[in-house]
């Protein structure tokens, strides 16, 4: 199969930007990624556009990518619109990689964008219910202990994950706060992060409660943003000197009632395709929509044996300078989580890390990088998961 590389990336600042449209964010990252790749627009054979909630929040249905690219240099290039809950961006990466590996294109651009701020407060939280089985929604809400109209159930979902993990591992609320504090410290070093404020463990524990053991600094915020990447199968060209190999990008689907975890299964497939093991990973970005997820995912990926992620966090092994830095970008809780852009933002971070261009948050001697991205809810399984493996 064709050797696929990431040859260019671009990313906006993440945050709340009421006056910034998806079209403006798309134009910014398209230009940035093409410039970084050193490619003319004419070299791009297809564009994969990731977005989750434009229909619910802006009314833009169906031809989202075509509309947002219409005023860019990529107008008229074939567009594939991708939606797969919070894993949409990573799913778009996987589809772009498949097109190149199959010989259908030499260069593609993959982008994710989300506009979540809305004049009607709470609109985005209500839209998130669309990432659950609508026929079973009353049942799922009751199982989570939520009353009708009480708001988005997803932080309650993460609270339930946290309770179950604590019961089997002995993790405490302080352990979750440690993970959050570490990520906010990382995010303070990231000029594109939505939040760049450090929080001590004590400050996180004392913050406003959200659900179960979760407090506000442990939860990803509502925000806007976009990110993009140019993938190539080319074997020659000046841009390849700074390129990063895309060893695998695997998408998995959860099945309700199946005991196996979709994240673990997807990771095994991704690692097998890439020819790596968990011990080979130098830097990791995980989907910490709430901080307890970081500890859970470390075990699902096989990086920590059962119930041992707590020791890693307590020992500082997942911090910058530690044995395996996790979420040097700040993760979702600090960097932000504009859903359609999240998977591409993880890719942006890891490309910068592998190039040695991450500045103050640089992981030394990083050669193998992994991103885990998940989304949706079947109860109790996530509906979608994606694991991407990169190498220098």
Image (tube, helix red, strand yellow):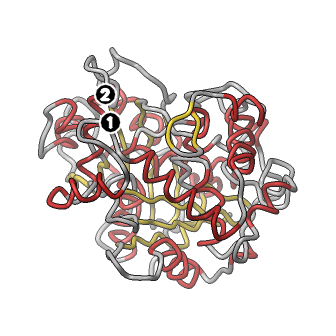
The CA span between labels 1 and 2 is: 5 Å
Give residue 153's position: percent from left, percent from top: 36, 46
Give residue 221's position: percent from left, percent from top: 48, 33
Q: Residues within 10 Å of mark 2 (few under 14, many from 20)?
A: few
Which residue is at a point 40% across and 48% down the rendered structure image?
154
Left or right: 340 in relation to 74: right
Residue 342 vs 82, above or below: the answer is: above
Q: Nearer the viewer, residue 11 or 14?
A: 14
Q: Residues within 10 Å of mark 1 (few under 14, many from 20)?
A: some
Which residue is at a point 55% across and 43% down the rendered structure image?
332
Residue 118 vs 299, above or below: the answer is: above
Is the N terminus in the top left, top right, bottom left or bottom right quadrant?
bottom left
Which residue is at a point 53% across and 61% down the rendered structure image?
372
Q: Are marks 1 and 2 in contact (CB under 8 Å)?
A: yes
Picture disc at residue 183: none
Picture disc at residue 125: 1
Q: Which residue is mark 2?
A: 122
Per the image, label 1 sits on a secondary structure element best described as helix
Give residue 373's position: percent from left, percent from top: 48, 58
């Amino acid at each position: 199969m064709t050797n696929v590389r990431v040859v260019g990336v671009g990313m906006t600042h993440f945050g709340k930007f009421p006056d910034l449209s998806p079209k403006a964010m798309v134009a910014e990252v398209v230009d940035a990624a093409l410039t970084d790749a050193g490619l003319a627009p004419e070299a791009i054979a297809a564009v994969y556009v990731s977005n989750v909630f434009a229909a619910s929040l802006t009314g833009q249905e169906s031809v989202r990518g075509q509309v947002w690219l219409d005023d860019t240099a990529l107008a008229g290039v074939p567009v594939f619109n991708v939606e797969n809950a919070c894993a949409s961006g990573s799913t778009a990466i996987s589809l772009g990689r498949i097109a190149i590996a199959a010989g259908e294109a030499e260069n593609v651009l993959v982008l994710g964008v989300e506009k979540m701020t809305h004049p009607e407060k709470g609109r985005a939280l209500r839209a998130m219910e669309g990432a659950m089985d609508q026929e079973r929604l009353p049942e799922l809400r009751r199982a989570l202990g939520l009353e009708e109209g009480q708001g988005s159930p997803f932080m309650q979902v993460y609270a339930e994950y946290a309770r179950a993990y604590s019961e089997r591992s002995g993790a405490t609320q302080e352990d979750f706060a440690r993970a959050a504090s570490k990520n906010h410290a990382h995010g303070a070093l990231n000029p594109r992060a939505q939040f760049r404020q450090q929080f001590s463990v004590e400050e996180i524990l004392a913050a406003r409660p959200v659900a179960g053991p979760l407090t506000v600094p442990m939860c990803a915020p509502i925000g806007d943003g976009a990110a993009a990447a140019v993938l190539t199968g080319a074997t020659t060209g000046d841009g390849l000197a700074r390129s990063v190999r895309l060893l695998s990008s695997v998408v998995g689907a959860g099945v309700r009632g199946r005991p196996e975890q979709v994240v673990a299964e997807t990771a095994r497939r991704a690692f097998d395709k890439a020819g790596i093991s968990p011990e080979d990973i130098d830097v990791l970005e995980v989907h910490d929509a709430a901080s307890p997820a970081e500890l859970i995912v470390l075990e699902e990926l096989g990086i920590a044996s059962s119930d041992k992620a707590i020791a890693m966090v307590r020992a500082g092994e997942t911090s910058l300078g530690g044995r395996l830095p996790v979420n040097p970008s700040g993760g979702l809780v600090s960097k932000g989580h504009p859903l359609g852009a999240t998977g591409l933002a993880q890719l942006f971070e890891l490309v910068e890390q592998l190039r040695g261009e991450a500045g103050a948050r640089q992981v030394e001697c990083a050669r193998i990088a992994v991103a885990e991205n998940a989304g949706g809810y079947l109860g109790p399984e996530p509906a979608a998961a994606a694991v991407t493996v990169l190498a220098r």
